[in-house]
Amino acid sequence: MSEKKDGHQLRKLQVDILRFDPHDPDDFPHIETFEIEEAHGMTLFVLLNEIREHHDNSLKFDFVCRAGICGSCSMLVNGKPTLACRTLTKKLDQHITLAPLPLFELIGDLSINTGTWMRGLNERLETWIHDKEQELNVDALEERMEPDLADEIYELDRCIECGCCVAGCGTIQMRPDFVGAVGLNKIARYHLDPRDKRDNKDYYELVGDENGVFGCMTLLGCEDVCPKDLPLQSKIAYLRRMMLRTGLKG
Amino acid sequence: MKIIYTDVLIIGGGLAGLRVATGVKERGHDAVILTLVPPKRSHSAAAQGGMQASLANCAMGEGDDEDVHFADTIKGSDWGADQEVARMFTHCAPKAIRELAAWGVPWSRVDRGDHTAIINAKKVTITERDEAHGLITARDFGGTKKWRTCYTSDGTGHSMLYAMDNKAHDDKVEIHERMEAIALLHENGRCYGAIARNLMDGELVAYVSKATTIATGGYGRIYEVSTNAIICQGMGQAIALETGIATLGNMEAIQFHPTAIVPVGILTTEGCRGDGGLLLDKDGYRFMPDYEPDKKELASRDVVSRRMTEHIRKGKGVKSHYGDHLWLDITILGREHIEKNLREVKEICENFLGIDPAEEWIPVRPTQHYSMGGIRTTYRGESQTLKGLYSCGEAACWDMHGFNRLGGNSVSETVVSGMLVAEYIADFCDTPESSVNIHSSTIEKFLKIEEEKIEALLTVENGEDAYVLRRAMEKIMMEKVGIFRNGKDLQEAVDELEALYKRSKNIEVFRSKSRAANPALVNAYRTQRMLKVALTVAYGALLRTESRGAHAREDYPERDDANWLKRTITSWPDKEQTMPTVTYEEIPIGKMELPPGFRGYGKDMTLHNTESKVRQETVAAIRKKLEEGGASRFEIQNALMPFKHKLPSKYQNRNERLNEPLGEEHE
């Protein structure tokens, strides 16, 4: 454990994992501790697979891309929601605690069902381009868009639905139907997009209440934990002003 | 017994599967998608650099069209591709991208006036036309004559996948997440759906359908290091193989991407080099111009990967804890460019390497990246041997990539093949022969077989450890079925894999005995199937005694058109056999629009087929005659190799470009 590289001393890591298998009637939530030799460049992806392969093959967790882009592996790392795959152990203390992201259905151990939640959100907010009038002609030149506007939309389109902002949200603890920063960001994204023909009134119907933009208590845990550094704070503020104006106009 | 009926069952919720689903829905057929993970987490999201479509909007793309895209694709494939399929693809790529633009992808756009770019390590000024302002722009990629790769920064796949999944929401496509297809249902040569296992509670469900589509992506994870997501384990190919009827094509055609980071193998996009990034060796020397003076860093992927490996073998690699690597230098592009157009690359470098790529070089080496091979289908996406089974995207071999895929052609293929195959499936579902004629006793039999297999894995004693077998397989594939291959290593690989496969029949799931969510159980049955897939790759590579595209044999360095202009077809007819059955399918030269020729890299090592010259002369004569008669490029193309009749009628029309307005020419 003494080998040095990049000035980092490899350690014996103590990893506490909150475990529970809801399918096992005899099981109950408990902490299990694993001692793991740290390796160079070790991420929590590598660490958890090491545990599964050599210590306990029943340990449940989710990775897909393992490159920080698919949003599958969100969990609480030392209490903070983040993507496990791109978390290097050398940036953490020797004692690491891992727990599943709260608020989502637990599949087992660190594995959670974000898919159903996000699908419900997308259906509720109708996060797709609404443009039923126009018949699409795929042979003709595409509709033009200002280059800067395309970049701005992409900026908000970068959300990976990882659920960190939901887990980091104070409001949602009290209002389970709150759409969260992930939902508000999506509304901001479609509002910006001229291809979506919905108007402010339509958006008001979707998020002009306390489960939408007026529910946010502005604690902004979302902004702190977003792994993609999305401009959630400014977009929520913008949406709130816009929705307020729309609401006052009636 | 739980049975769910639908018209079209789609296995895989990435770009290809989603596009099939929305397509058949539009035609009035029900669709259910089975997916291991929420669709937005599919590996399609990892496509960074872009999608090829010959829009010809940006200045460096001017003059581009289907003909140029077609020629690039065929040369890229080292003449292994099906030319009619490649034509269908290049014709429909502009349509697919325009559709995606309407569905919400924020494609980067042409900005009128001057901008600077880095080309061949020099700063140049490019002037964009006024009339192109606001249309979809493109960047340069390897092996292409024009700037044709359309993008949203370097998150192209992500944006495409999100738009596509959102469209599927809008179309009310039924999506069953965390459902893994573990066997295909079939009777009397017809496929009728699949048996799936719920990964959350372990329940087995029979999905019965008129048509079944496999869109599960590639099989990169049979290798120890791969850029692929960890779910890309070849399970779609494996369950097709296990029918004993469906066949796989060109499984040995494996692409290695030049620039994955060391050691973890995460991709940095070809866009890095397309935008002007350089490859450097341990001395900081730019070596690619020495090997490929013409295309340099932007030669085709297989070529760059081999040149890098050669250079490392000459001792020019950078020594590291994890073996030798080379450098990718994008610092010359400048921080502003990187933070706008290569931001995923920047995040990856920061998070996994702890470096800032605007300041420091990125350690890279060639890494398994793409599976050209897959489920062998007709141009309609249907298995050649099992009626009612379809496949598209990376999972399939229909076969537009031959032995090497061009960067930017994969995400493009997902949506193009998805839109086409959806139409062919819908046509099939419109006919009476699509009706479901499977006995319920057959469904019960299939369910019972799968139940028993799982039971066996959980109850066998003194069995094998699946992890041990799998790691051994991954290592064999890395060391013996890699970028450069030779007969001795390949024979060893095949023998060792066969031995592992035999052992895999006796896998025991140790300790973790749950029938519900159980990663050890999943690993056990997938390892058995991965070994079959690995055997098809290694055995196909051993038998193919030539070098073509990404399949490079040191003992057979020539591309052998005289003997090997054919596709490898693999099947597993008897479940007791421990080696796949291999046959071949000829690729007829007489029908080619672009007869085999020199690809343009290194020196010409081709052993030519005498027919190639005959066809070249025929093609030249037809072209000359028609050109003299003032024929359009469309008329010439049609005379050489008609393909449009194969397309669904709604996609047969021409594509508009700034210099090719619609309605001016008539065919």
Image (spheres, coloured by chain):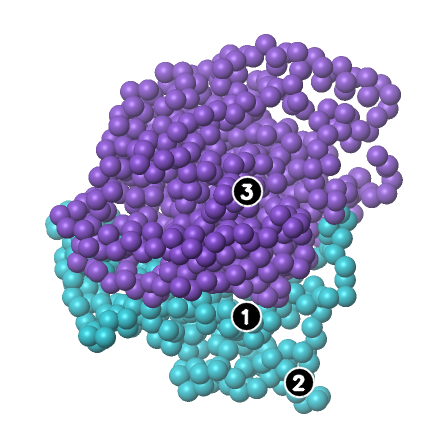
Chain colours: A cyan, B purple
What residue lies at 69% left-to-right and 47% top-to-bottom? B95
What residue lies at 63% left-to-right and 11% top-to-bottom? B613
Question: Marks 1 and 2: which is nearer the front?
Answer: 1
Residue A18 position (above or below residue B279) = below
Counting every numbered tag in the picture gives 3
> Dot 3 falls on which chain?
B
For disc 2, the marked residue is: A245
The reply to the same-chain question for discs 1 and 3 is no
What residue lies at 61% left-to-right and 40% top-to-bottom? B380
For disc 1, the marked residue is: A122
State the residue in front, B291 or B385. B385
Label 3 and label 2: CA atoms lie apart by: 59 Å
Label 1 and label 3: CA atoms lie apart by: 36 Å
Residue B289, image x, y percentages:
49, 24
Which quadrant is the C terminus of chain A positioned in? bottom right
For disc 3, the marked residue is: B387
Residue A242, image x, y percentages:
64, 80
Tell whether label 2 touches label 3 (CB within 8 Å).
no
